[in-house]
Amino acid sequence: MTITLKKPAKSARKAKGDGHLRRAEILEAAERIFIAEGYEGATIRKIADEVGVSSTALYMHFRDKAEILMEICEQSIRSLLTINTEIAARPVDPVARVRLMLEAYMRFALDNPNAYLIVFCATPREIVGEKKDLVTDLGELCFERFKGVVAEIAASGRLRTGTVESAAQTLWAAVHGLAALLIARPDFNWSPQDELERVMLDGLLYGLVID
């Protein structure tokens, strides 16, 4: 399966008085430009041109590109937190829940490649102050949800090696690595995505969990 970043044609300039511009449209355009141009290369004018509005109209929704980046990061991590929280609460075996959470992480990354590269594959230095603390706290809470289910496996005496912390970090790092490579190297001769995901999760979980 080949994964490519979405790069639709630029929108035609919206006529003055067309109505409210959806913030989501700006965020989607900004994601594409941040990936293609880098944060420094992205400008409000480029983002506005991509959306098809004036820079003045864009400033009605965001005060600067740093605020746009902050919102992309926050929305992405909140989305992943919602997914993890829902799966963690399911009344099924913890090993099955861990697998579901890792599969959901992969699906989230590959369905949202632009946001994933920005949030999880780069250091957003422009996130500062209270917003930085919020994004950090959300990320830590997201991982804690996942680690809590790994802890259930350990509590039942089924963790073959390592600690709850090291096992959870290893699982997360492995899935992150595969997702990042699939996104960043789409031209590599990858095996089918479903097969790669299955082989990786089988190897990880059979190695860490005692049946």
Image: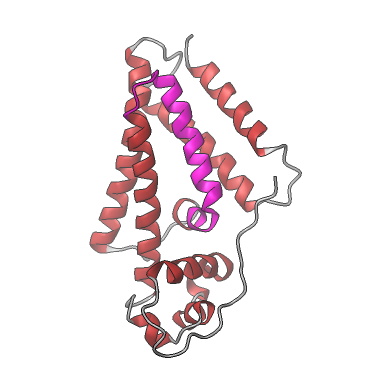
Pick whichever, 89 or 34, lies toward us: 89
Q: Residue at x 70, y 49 (%)?
A: 2
As drawn, 16 above or below 211 = below
Q: Is residue 77 left or right of residue 207?
A: left
As drawn, 107 above or below 27 = above
Picture quadrant where residue 64 is located: bottom left
Q: Residue furthest left?
A: 130
Q: Is residue 72 left or right of residue 144?
A: right
Q: Position of residue 113 (x, y in %)?
A: 54, 54
Q: Residue furthest right?
A: 189
Q: Residue at x 44, y 87 (%)?
A: 54
- Answer whether residue 27 is magenta in the image: no
Give the residues in magenta.
89-117
Q: Position of residue 19 (x, y in %)?
A: 38, 82
Figure coloring: secondary structure
As drawn, 48 above or below 163 = below
Q: Residue at x 29, y 58 (%)?
A: 132
As drawn, 101 above or below 8 = above
- The chief SS type of the magenta part is helix
Q: Position of residue 11 (x, y in %)?
A: 55, 78
Quadrant of the snapshot with the N terminus: top right
